[in-house]
Image (cartoon, rainbow, N blue to C red):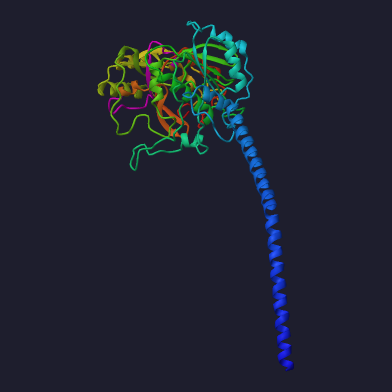
Amino acid sequence: MRGAKGASGSAFEARHRLSASVEEVYKRRFQKSKAKPFHISIQDRNSRCKFALLKLALIIIVSGTLVTFLYSPKAYNSNQLPNSGSGWIWGGPDPRYLSNLDIDWDDITTVLEKVSETSENWGIGLLNFNEREINHWKQLIPDAKSVDLHLDHAAKNVTWDSLYPEWIDEEEESEAPICPSLPKLRPPGIRLDLIAVKLPCRNEGNWSRDVARLHLQLAAADLAASFKGLYPVHLLFITKCFPQPSLFSCKELVSREGNSWLYKPDLNALRQKAQLPVGSCELALPFRGSDLVYSKNMHREAYATILHSADVYVCGAIAAAQSIRMSGSTRDLVILVDETISAYHRSGLEAAGWKIKTIQRIRNPKAEKDAYNEWNYSKFRLWQLTDYDKIIFIDADLLMLRNIDFLFGMPEISATGNNGTLFNSGVMVVEPSNCTFQLLMDHINEIESYNGGTKDT
């Protein structure tokens, strides 16, 4: 009985607890259902607030990016002139291309006065100038249409050694050597009368061996050469180091004031140069390529050699003349001799076909007295043979095995590579010019020859 009674009491208590628990659950659910709408409302408001803040933050970020892009000098000019170049370059300016030279605007005004054409309605391309300088250009020539030209920078792995390697496969036994590519300027969409370029110039011994400096000049030359016809295009370089004479010869120099160099290039010659490799990394005349189409103006072209200081090479010069004639060439033969070559030897040279021109020797200031190379800079006199447009120079101890008249179709200076940037001057194409001669003389103390002579320059 105790057990039954106890069991029934437990059941009652269990039912009471169950009833109580059901009531509690119901009450809790009721309270929860009353509080739920209020709770959801707060959550909804919080999420909406967070979403609004997120939208505001995104709008600020996007607006800031657009403002930065639009007011960037490169992007601004790119938007104004979409055809002028590559525009935006990530990563900031490339220090290789920077020039900290202060521009003398009076010098620029002075040299531009030498241009015969009026500056009204000019098209002016500006390369490698900063925003402040571009604005100054627009104030200087307000009637001109100025175009900010953008140039993609050369890859960091394009070095001077890659443009002028120690050795290339000249015989093309395995493959034809190819130079690294350098980006070019896109046509600006308008005719340019003037292309102005600000060039870097490092305060180093080898300032001319600068990839960025070469790249800027090649790009400007290529753009000028791309314009059709013979409508004149002037190039203005702002630099304290003189521009590349192999691209822009001094006979094309119209005016120079301080660091401003104004050129009026021969566009036909410039187009020819623009087709050449950028360095000795590639053959200008392929080993197995077809012969060049060269000038037929034979009376303005000649073979030349030089004898000075001794008569030991007289017989060699006579043999060289005979080999040229036997190859079939009818170009003039010109020989430069100094006072050490006797009348007897001169008569033999004339009989062989050489036209004799007497010169004064030029001493190598870095050579020792009575050294074999003491007077080797007498070769500079070749640039004074201005009766001719092109000269193929050959050393007096060389023999011609076949006709090489096609080399008259090559520009100055075309020569056989020797080692890296050095070329062998034993055979080379020269374009005589008194100003080039003067340029060489002005810098004679700066010229370095690794073997002390001129054969490897």
Nearest the camera: 49 or 29? 29
Q: Quadrant of residue 416?
A: top left
Measured as percent of width and height from the top left, residue 99 is found at 60, 25
Q: How many marks?
A: 0
Quarter holding residue 4: bottom right
Q: Is residue 308 magenta?
A: no
Nearest the eye: 131 or 156: 131
Residue 29 horizontal/vertical position (percent): 68, 62
- Can residue 161 be seen here? The reply is yes
Query: Which residue is nearer to you in this view: 292 or 359?
Result: 292
Q: Nearer the viewer, residue 267 or 147?
A: 147
Residue 168: where, in percent of width, then height? 40, 38
Q: Residue furthest bottom?
A: 1
Q: Position of 89 compared to 51: left or right?
A: left
- In the picture, the quarter occupied by the N terminus is bottom right
| Residue at horizontal 35 percent and vertical 24 percent from the top | 316
Q: Is residue 399 magenta?
A: yes
Residue at the spot x=54%, y=6% of the render?
113
Magenta stretch bounds: 383-404
